[in-house]
Amino acid sequence: MEVVRINGLSFSYNDDFSIEGVTISVNKGEVVSLLGPNGSGKTTLIKCVNALLMPNKGEIIVAGVDVKKYSRTDLARIIGYVPQSHEPSFPFTVHDVVLMGRVAHLDIFQQPSNSDYAKVAVAIQTVGLERLKDKPYTQISGGERQLTLIARALAQEPQVLILDEPTAHLDFKNQIQTLQIIRRLSRGRDIAVMLSLHDPNHALLFTDKTALLNSGRVVAFDVPDKVVNRENIARIYGIDVDVVSHGGHALIMPALAAKACPT
């Protein structure tokens, strides 16, 4: 079932940069990655889907409604957004940061109910941060902060989860852990997930479809094996790579490295 549909989307920053004619979709329970070099338009596209930027042309349909017709509160009940980075201004506890995800479901001056607190507890447990729930957000690692923001988005009970480079600044272990959790959430909760990535292998290993962007345009959109290939990587990134098979998965490696490794 299609939850997000982007049709012929175009947006420009005063002629300095633009995205043109973007058409992709995300289904319930599906993880779609946006892949491409720096400046290819991944973050711009994500901001358009989340109605932080208004496109010049085209439409974005989320849960059957054009995003322009949603209020910010109503959109927050449907889309959980995890930004690329977040610098806290106050040492809220992990629990309190996640509780902020319930704001979209509360009226002005309304206090969180027992039901809200229960949903926060489930969100924290889902990302494995129970032991840190009372710790200040400012005193936890980058990987733990990222999981806290994912838990905050989950507390919104969204139909769509959008993440802007969720593995940025994380070490290898936390990159894999974060992507595993995102994929599990998509499957387990039937959430439509859109996320931007830098590593083509992450797209191959953890996503259902990949949109390859370059200079603001989608040059390919399909299952990762058909998008992340030698020809496309050479054309978009300008480097020579080989596709190797390991454990039943295709992986991208620099050509010289691939020749030194058994397949």
Image (cartoon, rainbow, N blue to C red):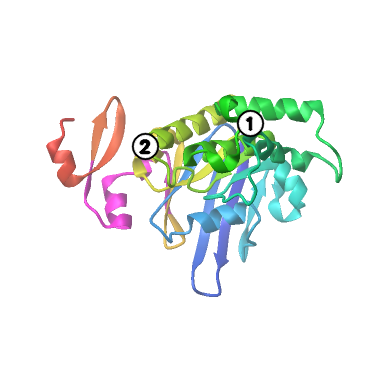
Front disc: 2 or 1: 1
The image's mark for residue 134 is 1
Residue under circle 2?
172
Q: Position of residue 157 (x, y in %)?
A: 69, 34
The stretch in magenta equals 219-242
Residue 76, located in which quarter of the rendered image?
A: top right
Whole-percent x, y for residue 177 in the image? 45, 31
The reply, left or right, for residue 169 in relation to residue 56 is: left
Instruction: Assess whether residue 130 is covered by the magenta stretch.
Output: no
Give the amino acid at mark 1: Asp
Q: Position of residue 183 (x, y in %)?
A: 50, 31
Q: Nearest the camera: 241 or 261? A: 261
Name the residue: 62% across, 62% down. 55
Q: What's the residue at 31%, 30% (across, down)?
A: 249
Type of amino acid at the residue the image marks with label 2: Phe
* Residue 130 falls left or right of residue 263: right
